[in-house]
Amino acid sequence: AQSVTQLGSHVSVSEGALVLLRCNYSSSVPPYLFWYVQYPNQGLQLLLKYTSAATLVKGINGFEAEFKKSETSFHLTKPSAHMSDAAEYFCAVRSGSGNEKLTFGTGTRLTIIP
Amino acid sequence: EPEVTQTPSHQVTQMGQEVILRCVPISNHLYFYWYRQILGQKVEFLVSFYNNEISEKSEIFDDQFSVERPDGSNFTLKIRSTKLEDSAMYFCASSGAYYGYTFGSGTRLTVV
């Protein structure tokens, strides 16, 4: 079984401040991990993914995430928040490639304070 | 970049009516999925489809739901008799042999 826990359903940061969105996972096999962003009334856009290569993964829009096996974490960070980063962020885990489903966390709504 | 296309973007239907949501996956992908997101909640897995048959389904995917790949390009989700609680955003996704997993932009289903 696989699961994802996102700590903090709402996070607010000031424009220019560090963004840190937390994700912890549970998986019985080495996982593949993903972060998706969803803007209001839109679909899911892939920010970045970890697929057992480098543990520090860089994605779009200046985001990055670090896979820490010992902590079972895959936290999302961005050094300097922009107003355009305001959105809902979902962490997801997949136990394997091929035909495996994604299991999503409950999401974190990021608000940027001007 | 290849996209997963979903139609319609928004559908309103009366309770008890049948609806069909349509998806065109990425052409060389092998695996197809439907997910659901009730407003304000997380994205939930409904069903996966491979080699012309369902490979996994969630407890949400009961007898009211069915999926089909009627030709070489389309992938459909049918809800036979819609309920108010079926109102949600429905996302189609497809993936290749390895890690690629692409979502469509979704169909917002409103049951009235």
Image (cartoon, coloured by chain):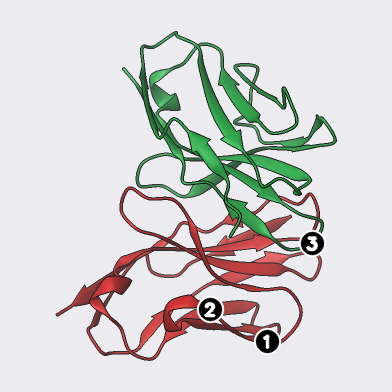
Chain colours: A red, B green
How many angstroms separate mark 2 from mark 3 (CA)? 19 Å
Question: Is there a contact, CB below 8 Å, between mark 2 and mark 1?
Answer: no
Residue at 28% over, 90% down: A17
Between B98 and A111, the residue placed more toward the observer is B98
Q: Seen from this angle, which residue lies furthest top?
A: B16
For the view shown, which residue lies furthest in the left direction?
Answer: A114
- Chain holding disc 3: B
The part of the image, by quadrant, that contains residue B100 is bottom right
Q: Are marks 2 and 3 in contact (CB under 8 Å)?
A: no
Q: Which residue is mark 1?
A: A55
Amino acid type at circle 2 is: Gly
Q: Could you give the CA–CA distance between mark 3 and mark 1, rounded to whole angstroms?
A: 18 Å
Q: What residue sits 56% from the left and 29% below the top?
A: B22
Q: Nearer the viewer, residue B66 or B98?
A: B98
Marks 3/1 same chain: no
The amino acid pointed to by label 3 is Tyr
The residue where tag 3 is placed is B98
> Mark 2, mark 1: which one is toward the viewer?
2
> Considering the numbered disc 1 on the image, is that residue within a helix, a strand or a loop?
loop
Q: Position of residue A97 (x, y in %)?
A: 79, 60
> Which of B62 and B48 lies nearest the eye of the viewer?
B48
Residue in view at x 64 percent, y 69 percent? A33
Q: Residues within 10 Å of mark 1 (few under 14, many from 20)?
A: some
Report, in whole angstroms, how far the alpha carbon at label 2 lies from the one at label 1: 13 Å
Quarter of the image for the N terminus of chain A: give it.
Answer: bottom right
Which amino acid type corresponds to the residue marked 1 in the rendered image? Thr
Chain where mark 2 sits: A
Which numbered marker is on residue A59? 2
